[in-house]
Amino acid sequence: MKKSDFEALSEFRYRMRKFLRFSEELLREEGVTPLQYLLLLHLKGYPGREWATVGELAERLQAQHHGVVALVSRCENLGLVKRRTSAEDRRRVEAHLTAKGERCIERLARLHRDELTSTSGGLFPVRAGRRPR
């Protein structure tokens, strides 16, 4: 590897850590943990539907099933998500965002997206002459 490869990797890790620190501080101010935010994000962003099972969320979070069950319970106690038995398969439990959860993830995701695209410290710097989408 060349010196420039190390510099690029270092810069990427620096920007990633800076973004994560921004996120951690923002979430702390909002009273949401990073894992709770990720759960809401993965529920809202689950491909093709508006809900996910605990197993699907565990995969997205790269976490143990029982840990995600506890995380869903904490989010449910905060009024951010609601569990529902599947109409298609009564053995399956679906996690859905509540109206409060929808408002929360919308606000937090917008702030995260804005930070990602900002020229002053985002993870993905804007090149000269290009505007963020």
Image: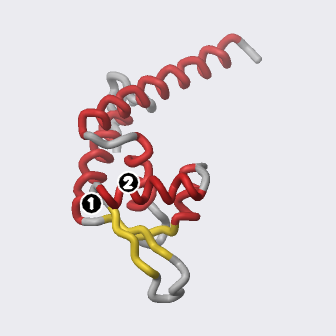
Q: Dot 1 lies on which element? A: loop
Q: Which mark is residue 35?
A: none
Q: Is 2 placed above or below 132 here?
A: above
- Using a 10 Å C-alpha cutoff, classify the residue at mark 1 as few (fewer than 14 neighbours), some (14 to 19) or many (20 or more): some
Direction right: furthest residue: 1
Rendered location of residue 49, percent (x, y): 44, 72
Whether residue 26 sits left or right of residue 61 in the image: it is left
Q: How many marks?
A: 2
Q: Is residue 68 left or right of residue 9?
A: left
Q: CA distance from mark 1 to mark 2?
A: 9 Å
Identified by mark 2, the residue type is: Arg
Quarter location, residue 26: top left
Residue beneath disc 2: 74
Q: Quadrant of the N terminus?
A: top right
Does dot 2 land on a helix, a strand or a loop? helix
Does the residue at mark 1 contact the one at mark 2 (Cβ under 8 Å)?
no
In terms of depth relative to the viewer, which is nearer, 124 or 128?
124
Q: Which quarter of the rendering shows the C terminus?
A: top left
Q: Which residue, given by chain and number where applicable, does mark 1 sit on?
A: 79
Q: Determine crowd level at label 2: few under 14, some 14-19, many 20+ residues with C-alpha closer than 10 A.
A: some
- What residue lies at 34% left-to-right and 63% top-to-bottom? 81
At a point 54% along the width and 25% down the height, the residue shown is: 12
Which residue is at a point 45% across and 88% down the rendered structure image? Answer: 87
Amino acid carrying mark 1 in the image: Gly
The residue positioned 45% from the left and 73% from the top of the image is: 94
Mark 1 vs 2, N-terminal side: 2
